[in-house]
Image (spheres, grey):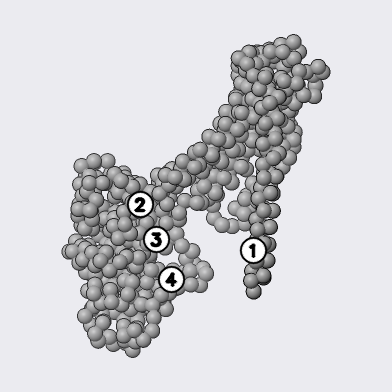
């Protein structure tokens, strides 16, 4: 008896150790990437690097136009994807009847999330740049990134709406509120932190993508900042791609400095999203 | 004339659960009418017909008439929003909205478009007084409602209904989650409220039915078996099935 329970205890110990090791294994590459880029990129960071224009065939100077471009693209993506995505999610979660058409829409949305980003890029080139004649522009790039981001925003928003207890809806209706009043006054405010988290995570992905902007907006080098939505712009991920593959004799620290800026841009969005979520969980009344 | 008149009413859900068959029932004003019987008998369904909350459920078939003050509330022309303000409902589990105590009470008026702040403030105190909760919460009206105890939450739910100054109050096992003292408080406030309201209660036990009923209706598997005054129903029922249930032989 005693030896068998001892054996089972040993087995359990072994199992736990294995799981612990696996968990730490996943941290290694993540920590590795961050440390590597920090070490190689930090020396590049200076006032001039952040706020200056590229000089000397991009081998000197700064990356300001790329930072601004990525910022504009993120805003542009938000302008299209957030209202459409949240609207669609409200419809799917609160109004859509449970029928074949609705299920089809859901399947479509899920599959949309699986399309490779370069395909979105090509689609954006065909539809926005060429057919609608927006040209290589922030407008075309933002629209392309919006389409790519929509599935993420729709599914996370729908999830956030559905997590608000059904009883709130019933009670609200029973005191004479309309469905829309219920959504506006109870469901949306309660789901807002979850929605924001989803939106930020979606936009974060858009900010870091290279392929969708490759054909639709990104400029190799522009000596000025974009002044209208119909201008092309430089952008961080594309700039990183260009200076890493297209420019011979590129100083390594500029490459990693650019990567570091992009990483900080994306990670700070991530941290904002996580903070919103954990704060809201702590204050939640259900 | 009776406040509510249910005439040959039948109802069926798409999943085949709990239906109602040919119910006819007259519900008088200013009394407590109790709908009682074993689970699955259709009590809640009947209750939810009276404020059209059943519109949210998957009803496949419905026929008959339900008149409130002589008007058919099942008619397509019925203003359902107005009906729900007239016919308030308290649920089995106290569900406070994720707001403050005060906002829970003003929510119904606010969605009704009430702007008069005197009237809104007046209704907060009034409804809390009527639900016997005022003394316990008057100093913390802006605290989150969720911080109240279960019994207090349920009385807040009652007050939320009263704040709308309804004519009919539906209560679906309102004390099922409460301790005996809180239950007593709720029952006591109901006795006071019937002066001004028509009350329809699904009790959580036969004992509660007997304690509260002016008029009692026994529902069994979607059928209305017997209607009688509270006194008769629990001492001398006519139907054998009612007798068996009241004496605790089944259910």
Would you place residue B179 above or below residue B229 in this image?
Answer: above
Q: Name the residue under label 3.
A: B53
CB-based contact (under 8 Å), mark 1 and mark 2: no
Q: In the image, B209: left or right of A69? A: left
Q: Distance between the residues labelled 1 and 2?
A: 44 Å
Circle 2/circle 4 CB separation < 8 Å: no
Residue B161 in which image quadrant: bottom left
Examine the rendering and report whether any part of residue B220 can be seen. yes
Which residue is at the front of the view, B206 or B236? B206
Asked if badges 2 and 3 are on one and the same chain, I answer: yes
Where is mark 4, residue-wise?
Answer: B11
Secondary structure of residue under mark 3: helix
Q: Is A112 placed left or right of A189 in the picture?
A: right
Q: Earlier in the sequence, mark 4 or mark 3?
A: 4
Q: How far apart are marks 2 and 3 (CA)?
A: 24 Å
Which circle, 2 or 4, is nearer the viewer? 2
Q: Which residue is labeled 2 in the image?
A: B146
Image coordinates of residue B41 in percent, x first then y, are: 40, 76
For image coordinates 57% across by 28% down, the residue present is A75
- Mark 4 vs mark 3: same chain? yes
For the N terminus of chain A, give its image quadrant: bottom right
Is disc 4 placed on a helix, strand or loop? Answer: strand
- Disc 2 is attached to a residue of which chain? B
Judge depth for marks 4 and 3 and give the one in front: 3
Question: What residue is rendered at 30% in x and 66% in y?
Answer: B179
Where does the image place residue A91, in percent across and percent down from the top left?
Answer: 53, 47
* Of the two numbered discs 1 and 3 in the rendering, the one whose residue sits closer to the viewer: 1
The answer to whether mark 4 and mark 3 are in CB contact below 8 A is no
Residues marked 1 and 2, same chain: no
Q: Which residue is drawn at 76% across and 18% down?
A: A251
How far is mark 1 from mark 4, CA to CA? 59 Å
């Amino acid at each position: 008896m005693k030896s068998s329970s001892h054996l089972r205890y040993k087995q359990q110990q072994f199992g736990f150790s294995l799981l612990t090791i696996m968990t730490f294994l996943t941290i290694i590459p993540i920590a590795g990437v961050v440390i590597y880029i920090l070490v190689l990129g930090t020396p590049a960071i200076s006032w001039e690097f952040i706020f200056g224009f590229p000089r000397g065939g991009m081998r000197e100077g700064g990356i300001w136009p790329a930072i601004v471009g990525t910022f504009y693209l993120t805003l542009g993506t938000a302008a299209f994807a957030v209202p459409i995505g949240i609207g669609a999610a409200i419809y799917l979660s609160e109004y859509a009847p449970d029928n074949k058409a609705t299920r089809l829409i859901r399947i479509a949305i899920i599959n949309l999330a699986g399309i490779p980003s370069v395909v979105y890029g090509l689609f954006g080139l065909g539809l926005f740049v060429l057919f609608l004649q927006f040209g290589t522009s922030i407008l075309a790039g933002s629209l392309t990134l919006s389409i790519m981001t929509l599935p993420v925003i729709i599914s996370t928003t729908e999830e956030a709406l559905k997590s608000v207890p059904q009883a709130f809806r019933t009670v609200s209706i029973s005191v004479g509120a309309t469905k829309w009043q219920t959504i506006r006054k109870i469901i949306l405010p309660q789901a807002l932190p979850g929605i924001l988290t989803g939106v930020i995570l979606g936009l974060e992905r858009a900010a870091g993508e290279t392929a969708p902007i490759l054909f639709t907006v990104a400029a190799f080098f522009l000596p000025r900042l974009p002044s209208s939505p119909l201008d092309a712009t430089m952008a961080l991920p594309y700039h990183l791609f260009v200076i890493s593959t297209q420019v011979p004799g590129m100083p390594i620290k500029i490459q990693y400095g650019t990567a570091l800026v992009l990483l900080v841009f994306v990670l700070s969005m991530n941290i904002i999203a996580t903070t919103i979520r954990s704060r809201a969980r702590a204050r939640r009344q259900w | 004339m009776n406040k509510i008149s249910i005439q040959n009413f039948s109802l069926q859900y798409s999943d085949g659960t709990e239906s109602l068959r040919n119910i006819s029932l007259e519900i008088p004003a200013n009394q407590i009418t109790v709908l009682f019987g074993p689970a699955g008998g259709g009590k809640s369904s009947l209750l939810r017909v009276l404020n059209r909350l059943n519109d949210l459920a998957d009803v496949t078939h419905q026929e008959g008439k339900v008149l409130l003050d002589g008007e058919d509330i099942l008619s397509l022309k019925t203003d359902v929003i107005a009906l729900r303000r007239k016919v308030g409902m308290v649920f089995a589990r106290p569900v406070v909205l994720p707001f403050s105590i005060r906002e829970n009470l003003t929510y119904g008026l606010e969605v009704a478009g009430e702007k008069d702040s005197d009237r809104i403030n007046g209704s907060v105190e009034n409804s809390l007084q009527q639900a016997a909760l005022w003394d316990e919460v008057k100093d913390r009206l802006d605290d989150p409602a969720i911080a109240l105890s279960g019994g207090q939450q349920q009385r807040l739910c009652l007050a939320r209904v009263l704040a709308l100054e309804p004519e009919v109050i539906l209560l679906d096992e309102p004390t099922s989650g409460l301790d005996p003292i809180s239950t007593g408080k709720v029952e006591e406030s109901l006795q006071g409220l019937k002066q001004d309201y028509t009350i329809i209660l699904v009790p959580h036990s036969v004992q509660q039915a007997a304690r509260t009923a002016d008029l009692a209706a026994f529902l069994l598997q979607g059928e209305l078996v017997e209607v009688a005054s509270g006194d008769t129903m629990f001492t001398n029922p006519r139907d054998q099935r009612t007798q068996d249930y009241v004496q605790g032989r089944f259910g």
